[in-house]
Amino acid sequence: MAAPHTYQTRAIVIKQSKIGEADRIVTIYTPGLGKLTAIAKGACRPGSKLGGNVAPLTYSSMMLAKGRNLDIITQGQTIDAFPALKNDLWHMACALYTLELVDSSTLENSENGPLFDLLLNTLRRLCQSENDRTVVRYFELHLLQHLGYRPQLRRCANCDSPLNPVINFFSYGQGGILCPHCNRRETTPRPLSVDALKVLRLWQGCDYATASRVKIGSKLSLELKQVMQGYIRHLLQGEVKSMTWLEELEKKSVDNSCGTD
Ligand SMILES: [Zn+2]
């Protein structure tokens, strides 16, 4: 039987760029087909029925037609446009960061249903939650898990001995924690406090509702951010543009709060 010429899917729009006068190339993430690049014809024309449904940071139901090279989005219906994210610069930056990580860590046509669910749930949590740093850290840790880079947090990643409640070390190269003895051979040691290791272990194995109940002070929050983003940068081996943007926004908010003291 010949493959169907059209198919329907739910999709989160990751990014788009203009092509020609009126068309757009759109990168979407879907539950059953993973990441796809498709064409939205006429999406830039005023009054186009497709336009808003294929805008970045939109969750839509789409009909696509098989194309010779790229598939063509023929219809779209927005399920959620996440207005709460688009109305707040910091939350939008967090959301674009999650989209960029999914985009740069996945290949086209590689199905990963749990990753789709994680991304969608993360965007919904960012709309509702005040606890956005926990939302983002939980996303990073579980993204790594769904991609096969679950960090080894229970035993030393080098000698396999149980880890003691002392300062241990995160080895990006070995993808897990090193005991103080094994860390001596590391060229770029990244110390990890007992509390940070406890939180990462808990978050790795629990649902988000449980993760969100952990109270995280600002020093621990900074440590968790640095270790997770360091590991992600190491794995992606490149700059994550929205990570830099988040850093700048955070720095500005610190400067502003210092200025009002
Ligand atoms: Zn060891």
Image (cartoon, rainbow, N blue to C red):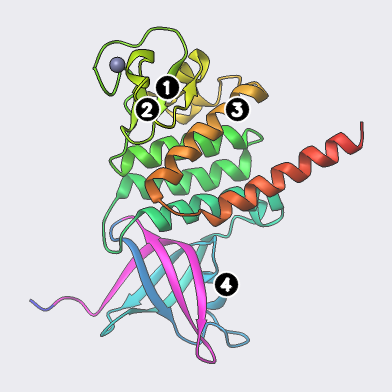
Residue receiving disc 1: 169
- Which secondary structure, mark 3? helix
Residue receiving disc 3: 221
Q: Residue at x 46, y 49 (%)?
A: 120
- Which secondary structure, mark 4? helix
Whether residue 134 is in magenta: the answer is: no
Q: Residue 135, percent across and down? A: 54, 36
Which amino acid type is shown beneath numbered disc 2?
Glu
Residue 52: give its label. 4
Whichever of labels 3 and 1 marks the residue nearer the N terminus, that label is: 1
Please identify the quarter of the rendering in which residue 82 is found.
bottom right
Q: Which of labels 3 and 1 is toward the front?
A: 1
Q: Measure the alpha-carbon separation of dots 2 and 3.
A: 25 Å
For residue 221, say whether it is visible: yes
Labelled pair 1, 2 in contact (Cβ < 8 Å): yes
Q: Which of labels 2 and 3 is toward the front?
A: 2
Q: Measure the alpha-carbon separation of dots 3 and 1.
A: 17 Å
Labelled pair 3, 1 in contact (Cβ < 8 Å): no
Q: Quadrant of the N terminus?
A: bottom left
Q: In this picture, which residue range is highlighted in magenta?
A: 3-31
Whichever of labels 2 and 4 marks the residue nearer the N terminus, that label is: 4
Whether residue 13 is in magenta: the answer is: yes
